Image (cartoon, helix red, strand yellow):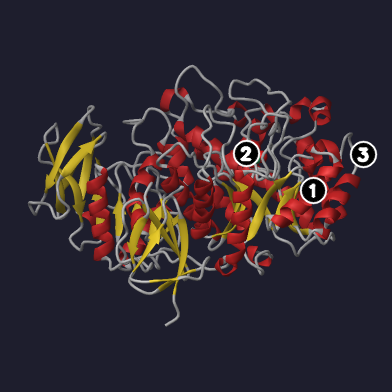
């Protein structure tokens, strides 16, 4: 099977989206020369070129692309050749308006932007297959092409009558009979019992709340429909080329698609990452997303898009310093990316993205930004040996799309207990300590992890629950966060003392969810006062628990639940349940204590991690990112070599202000 390793035999990939169709031919030659100077190794071509490749139905105009591919090949630049199906040409929308998507109010959208396709439109699918097949046949043997890139950020949700019909067929396959659907969803509520399949529509705008099981299944259906679209194009490519990998670019924790269910179909997991330089939380969120991608890939993945500086789609677009650009790029590499690609090579003077940064800005190549782009190219070339190396993770964080979807439906006890903020809050202490983390499914094979964290796992189906219990039976250690294992796979609330699938193992049962009034309540020692993890504050969320055999680590102090347990663990110390949102310091102490008790240590050579230093270990390489405005002196346990300069360091290394170093243990 083709893999990312096919692309990285000579090192990390460097480049970006290249849209030569926006430029005169003279610029193409300049581009190739500038790419060589910047040590670009691969560009993604053709993402939005459908209207140029096929200006009218079945009139294929490949000549310009032949020239582009030849030029790039002569220049030694490889190509990730895209199918252009993310932006159908105006003639298609005009010819068949039903190729356009419909919103949740039933209004058909127009063309004039991009992603204006209905995933289930037979015409769109047929035309997408046709152009893909033409492209594959024409360029499968072109020596520049090293990878295929299907569509772009597949993710359009549509609510049209055609999708409604496909949704019904999907439900019929899933449930077989209306009786089974009624029982699974619980349609006895609000007179929602369906007496014929035809009555089931997508969850369109309605006067009041929609049924959460209906909405959940529609999200699952949309994810499957988009995957079918990917497969349709992939199959056209495979019909003529079995040797090059096929990818499609993901969007991190994107709510529209369950990427985990897609991962097995994608040869190279690739992702687009746009951390906001104005957001102090962005580095931790980006690192977690990179870990998700590496986990989906089961090894190295590819940063398919990032920005060299500002994007243009936020309200206020803060640019990146060149140091920041380098950090964002090398963080991805540290977390398993085998390359760095940007959107885009040359900044567009026209169109909606005319103010988006690029590798070559409007001001040209003699600029601060482009010099930094060249420097990054040199650095990545020096880091060639990083390609293919693995990240070791003894800790896993559980994340599941269905659970995320179900948890964030309206009409739950609170809309303030959000999945991603919880995930990031639990991930942060591990990230700060430089401890490797994988992001796994409830049904993943967990045996190799010494500690499994489920910060917010609202929905847990029976298979997931059995898998987590099996992990505990085999000697594992699981920490469950608040409001977890509440719903089953159909989003039905499990009845009994919660967390229902674990209450017997835990030795405690929850009776009531108790969102807290604004402000905080205290958290103090439980069975052992003072608490080994210290005291702190709880906010937003609490639960009323009744203990049977569990041990109590923390109790609420003050408020309605004064004296009641807030953090408990099973007698054997391997199942922990946190029934609240503690302050960041307390959460950190507790999680690091669990890490410590499980014998998990950092794999990096730092004797201590100073605050404001981000550290990540990949194979033998240690990445150090200084987030502070001052140089940081970092103590080392062993003699290390700076991979980029060759200098040796011990007993400490100084990371310059906003600087990034890559170290490797010196051979002894
Ligand atoms: C991505 C997209 C690119 C470009 C970029 C701008 O979502 O794939 O085509 O639009 O955003 O940041």
Q: Give the spatial CA distance, label 3 vs label 1.
A: 30 Å
Within-10-Å neighbours for mark 3: few <14, some 14–19, many 20+: few
Say which mark, if any, is on residue 646: none
Q: Is residue 188 above or below residue 508?
A: above
Residue carrying label 3: 59
Q: Give the spatial CA distance, label 3 vs label 2.
A: 34 Å
Of marks 1 and 2, which one's residue comes earlier in the chain? 1
Front in this rendered view, residue 424 or 485: 424
Select label 3 or label 1 by which is in front.
1
Q: Residue furthest front?
A: 366
Is residue 616 shown left or right of residue 168?
Answer: left
Q: Can residue 578 be seen in this snapshot?
A: no
Disc 3 residue: CB within 8 Å of ligand 1: no
Of marks 3 and 2, which one's residue comes earlier in the chain? 3
Give the quadrant of ligand 1: top right
Q: Quadrant of residue 199?
A: top right
Residue carrying label 2: 357
Q: Is residue 255 above or below residue 569?
A: above
Q: Quadrant of residue 23?
A: top right
């Amino acid at each position: 099977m083709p893999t990312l390793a096919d692309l990285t035999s000579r090192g990390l990939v460097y480049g970006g989206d290249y849209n030569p169709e926006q430029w005169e031919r003279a610029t193409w030659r300049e581009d190739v020369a500038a790419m060589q100077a910047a040590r670009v190794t691969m560009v993604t071509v053709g993402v939005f070129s459908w209207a140029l490749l096929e200006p009218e139905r079945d009139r294929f105009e490949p000549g310009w692309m032949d020239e582009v591919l030849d030029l790039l090949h002569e220049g030694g630049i490889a190509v990730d050749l895209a199918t252009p199906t993310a932006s159908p040409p105006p003639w298609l929308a005009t010819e068949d308006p039903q190729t356009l998507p419909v919103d949740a109010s039933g209004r058909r959208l127009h063309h004039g932007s991009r992603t204006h396709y209905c995933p289930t439109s037979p015409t769109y699918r047929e035309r997408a297959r046709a152009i893909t097949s033409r492209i594959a046949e024409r360029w499968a043997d072109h020596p520049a092409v090293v990878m295929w890139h299907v569509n772009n950020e597949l993710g359009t949700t549509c609510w049209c009558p055609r999708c409604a019909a496909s949704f019904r067929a999907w439900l019929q396959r899933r449930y077989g009979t209306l009786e089974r659907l009624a029982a699974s969803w619980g349609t006895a509520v609000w007179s929602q019992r369906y007496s014929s399949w035809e009555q089931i529509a997508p969850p369109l705008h309605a006067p009041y709340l929609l049924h959460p099981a209906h909405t959940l299944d529609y999200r699952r259906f949309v994810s499957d429909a988009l995957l079918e679209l990917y497969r349709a194009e992939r199959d056209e490519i495979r019909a003529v080329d079995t040797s090059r990998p096929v990818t499609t670019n993901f969007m991190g924790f994107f709510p529209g698609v369950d990427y985990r269910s897609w991962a097995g179909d994608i040869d190279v997991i690739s992702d687009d990452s746009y951390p906001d330089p104005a957001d102090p939380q962005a580095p931790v969120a980006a690192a977690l997303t990179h870990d998700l991608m590496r986990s989906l890939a089961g090894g190295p993945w590819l940063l398919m898009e990032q920005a060299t500086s500002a994007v243009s789609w936020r309200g206020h677009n803060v640019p990146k310093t060149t140091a920041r650009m380098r950090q964002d790029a090398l963080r991805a590499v540290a977390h398993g990316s085998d390359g760095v690609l940007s959107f885009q090579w040359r900044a567009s003077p026209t169109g909606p993205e005319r103010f988006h940064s690029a590798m070559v800005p409007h001001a040209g190549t003699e600029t601060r930004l482009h010099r930094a782009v060249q420097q990054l190219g040199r650095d990545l070339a020096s880091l060639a040996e990083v390609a293919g190396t693995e990240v070791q993770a003894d800790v896993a964080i559980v994340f599941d799309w269905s659970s995320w979807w179900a948890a964030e439906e309206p009409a739950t006890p609170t809309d303030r207990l959000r999945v991603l903020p919880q995930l990031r809050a639990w991930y942060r202490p591990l990230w700060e300590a430089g401890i490797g983390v994988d992001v796994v499914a409830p049904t993943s094979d967990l045996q190799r992890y010494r500690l499994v964290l489920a910060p917010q796992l609202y929905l847990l189906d029976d298979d997931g629950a059995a898998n987590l219990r099996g992990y505990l039976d085999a000697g594992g250690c699981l920490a469950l966060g608040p409001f977890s294992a509440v719903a089953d796979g159909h989003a039905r609330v499990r009845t009994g003392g919660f967390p229902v699938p674990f209450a017997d193992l835990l030795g405690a049962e929850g009776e009531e969810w108790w969102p807290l009034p604004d402000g905080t309540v205290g958290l103090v020692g439980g069975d052992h006062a003072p608490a080994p993890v210290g005291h702190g504050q709880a906010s937003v969320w609490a639960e009323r628990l009744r203990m049977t055999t569990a041990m109590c680590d923390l109790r609420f102090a003050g408020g309605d639940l004064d004296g009641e347990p807030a953090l408990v663990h099973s007698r054997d110390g391997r199942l922990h349940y946190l029934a609240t949102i503690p302050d960041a310091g307390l959460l950190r102490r507790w999680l690091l204590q669990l890490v410590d008790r499980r014998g998990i240590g950092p794999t990096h050579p730092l004797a201590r991690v100073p605050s404001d230093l981000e550290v990540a270990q990949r194979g033998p390489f240690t990445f150090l990112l200084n987030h502070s405005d001052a140089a940081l002196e970092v103590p080392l346990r062993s003699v290390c070599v700076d991979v980029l300069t060759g200098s040796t360091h011990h007993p400490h290394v100084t990371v310059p202000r906003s600087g990034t170093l890559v170290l490797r243990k010196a051979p002894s």
